[in-house]
Image (tube, grey):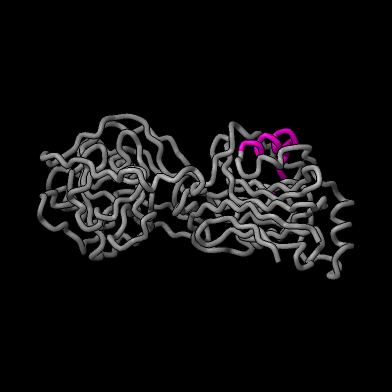
Amino acid sequence: MANFRKALNLPLIAAAIALSGACSSGNNPSGSGTSVRPQGSVLEAAENEGDDAGAPQTKGKVAAAARVEIPSGKFIAGSTPGDPGRDAVLEPATLEVELGAYTIDRYLYPNEPGKPPVTNVTRSKAEELCRVRGARLCTELEWERACKGDPENAYSTGSQWNPSCAKEPESCASTFGVAGMGAALREWTASDVQPIENMQAKAAAVRGARSDAAAVDHRCAHRTAVDGTAAGGDIGFRCCSGPPNAAQIASPAWQQTFRRAEISVGEVTKMLASVPNIKDLATDISFFKEPDDPNIVLARGDAGAPPQNVTLTTSPLLWSPVPGEELLVVAGRAQKDSFIVAFYRLPGDRYRIGSSLWLKGEKGPVVLGFNGYVRRKLSWATCWDCNGESGNITYREDGRVVITQK
């Protein structure tokens, strides 16, 4: 049996509910396929981008003025596919947004340092309290821009979460000088999370995180959907002034689970060559062929034909396990080895490494097996359903894509 070498790069995200047979699933990739033209180098997995654990965790200066002027301008909302903690269903993928100038309270309501924030109010009550002051509830994109600051940071505290801010939120400010954003309380916004068929009802968009939340939940892009009529001790709010910005986040739609991807061998070679720990695969790349190679893989196994509704293919696939997420999965041969690689697809046809499996000394063929009604998993095999020569590619609840061997 071949020597299997794993080279796994495992970013994370979260996604809500797995739906079998949800909208636009379908079992067979349609037509001649979707053209894929990768732009630029493949991004590294988040945990492989460099260890900045020793970097200072900022605590921006908090000024005396009660309100902060945020200038007009563009910023990047959301997060990059593959970022730790990212929820692909709720967080847009690096969405450029232009906002007009506005003013935001430096502290949570009542916007008085040293006084505890007001909680246990519904969103409509929060809106009323802001209105009494001649202000309004902030939109979620106004909140996110004030949190990310200039330059834009993943957290209000910088590139990393500073745990001390959960205990002393008023001492931590974004580079704009807005205090306590994402530090110890969630916050109402005036925006809504738009519905997603069979998955998400319309709800109020809430930003920030509780003091005891996971570090990744304190990111400025973190977003949750909450019933606007709820009232909790962990939800506060802050007010904004100036004309409200109309920009909002659209919810993603369900996509067909699997589609054939049209991508050249040369483009796959460039993609592999740009990922440090699998760059040695980028030599003499070739794809396996249909229908002969799937028949070879079936003949090697003892299971006979694949289960009903499972399609075997050697084609590169575009895979949408949940709304808002798409991955490119490619299997091929590199000299005497074979490989399977899954890439997160980013806006602008950019890519980020998700997971890879390097089959040393295995010339293949390798096939991919999928059922369009099973959204979060597909199979791979060099010998259909054989131990050690088959496995799964899984999109986990935390958003990591993982290639495993049986």
| Residue positioned 35% across, 43% down in the render | 55
Residue 347 in the image: state x and y as whole percent.
Answer: 54, 38
Which quadrant of the rendered structure holds the C terminus? bottom right
Give the farthest residue toward the bottom: 303
Give residue 25's quadrant in the image: bottom right
Q: Give the magenta-colored segment's residue range.
A: 259-274
> Is residue 290 left or right of 132 when viewed as pictured?
right
> Is residue 186 left or right of 385 when viewed as pictured?
left
Is the residue 372 above or below the residue 153 in the image? below
Q: Is residue 40 visible?
A: yes
**Residue 268, magenta (yes or no):** yes
Residue 121 in the image: state x and y as whole percent.
Answer: 21, 61
| Camera-side residue of 340 and 246 | 340
| Camera-side residue of 98 and 196 | 98
Residue 94 in the image: state x and y as whole percent.
Answer: 46, 40
> Is residue 81 left or right of 114 when viewed as pictured?
right
**Residue 265, magenta (yes or no):** yes
Residue 187 in the image: state x and y as whole percent.
Answer: 27, 54
Q: Is residue 143 visible?
A: no
Give residue 322's quadrant in the image: bottom right
> Is residue 377 left or right of 118 when viewed as pictured?
right
Is the residue 68 above or below the residue 199 in the image? above
| Residue positioned 24% across, 45% down in the render | 59
| Residue positioned 61% across, 46% down in the render | 343
